[in-house]
Image (cartoon, grey):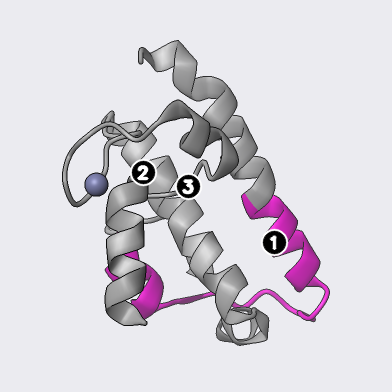
């Protein structure tokens, strides 16, 4: 994949990110931003300033998705996008189309799910 291939992915990740943020910004009166440790953990040097209320108003799934999206955007910036974070193999295109923020290939995902279950 060359850099141009990432553009549409980047765009769809950013759109999805804004969808989540827009949906939840309804909960906010004022934008007092607090850097969150959680966001920091998951995404080093993320430009992520979410309010605490905002994060709390997210469902776990949405929060997880938002972090995954941020992390995926960073991997694009670092040129590491599309590579499984565990086994370092390329993630299938089909999978990336369905879940553009996924950090894991299908094998590692299934393994992780069966371990946490
Ligand atoms: Zn893998």
Q: Is residue 113 above or below residue 100?
A: below
Badge 2 marks a residue whose secondary structure is helix
Judge by depth and name the residue closer to the eye, 78 or 35: 78
Query: Residue 64 or 104: which is nearer the viewer?
Result: 104
Residue at 39% x, 31% y is 92
Residue corresponding to mark 1 = 20
Which callout, 3 or 2, points at the residue further toward the start of the chain?
2
Q: Nearer the viewer, mark 1 or mark 3?
A: 3
Residue 87 percent location from the top left of the image: 16, 46
Categorize mark 2 by other alpha carbons within 10 Å: few (<14), some (14-19), many (20+).
Answer: some
Eyeballing the image, is 79 above or below 64? above
Residue position marked by numbered label 3 in the rendering:
101
Residue 114 seen in the current view = yes
First along the sequence among labels 1 and 3: 1
Residue 28 sits inside the magenta stretch? yes
For label 1, count other residues whose C-alpha is less than 10 Å away and answer few (under 14), some (14-19) or many (20+).
Answer: some
Residue 30 included in the magenta stretch of the image: yes
Q: Nearer the viewer, residue 107 or 32?
A: 107
x and y, in percent, of residue 16 in the image = 66, 49
| Distance CA(mark 3)–CA(mark 2) | 10 Å
CA–CA distance in space, label 2 to label 1: 18 Å
Quarter containing the N terminus: top left
Point 55% across, 72% down: residue: 63
User: Is 51 positioned to the left or the right of 89 in the image?
Assistant: right
Q: Which mark is residue 74?
A: 2
The mark nearer the N terminus, 2 or 1, is 1
């Amino acid at each position: 994949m060359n850099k141009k291939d990432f553009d549409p992915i980047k765009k769809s990740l950013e759109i999805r990110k804004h969808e989540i943020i827009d949906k939840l910004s309804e909960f906010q009166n004022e934008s007092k931003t607090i850097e969150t440790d959680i966001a920091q953990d998951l995404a080093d040097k993320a430009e992520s300033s979410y309010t605490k209320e905002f994060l709390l108003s997210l469902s776990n799934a949405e929060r997880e998705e938002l972090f995954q999206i941020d992390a995926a955007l960073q991997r694009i910036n670092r040129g590491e996008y599309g590579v499984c974070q565990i086994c370092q193999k390329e993630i299938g295109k089909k999978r990336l189309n369905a879940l553009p923020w996924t950090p894991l290939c299908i094998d590692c995902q299934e393994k992780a799910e069966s371990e946490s279950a």
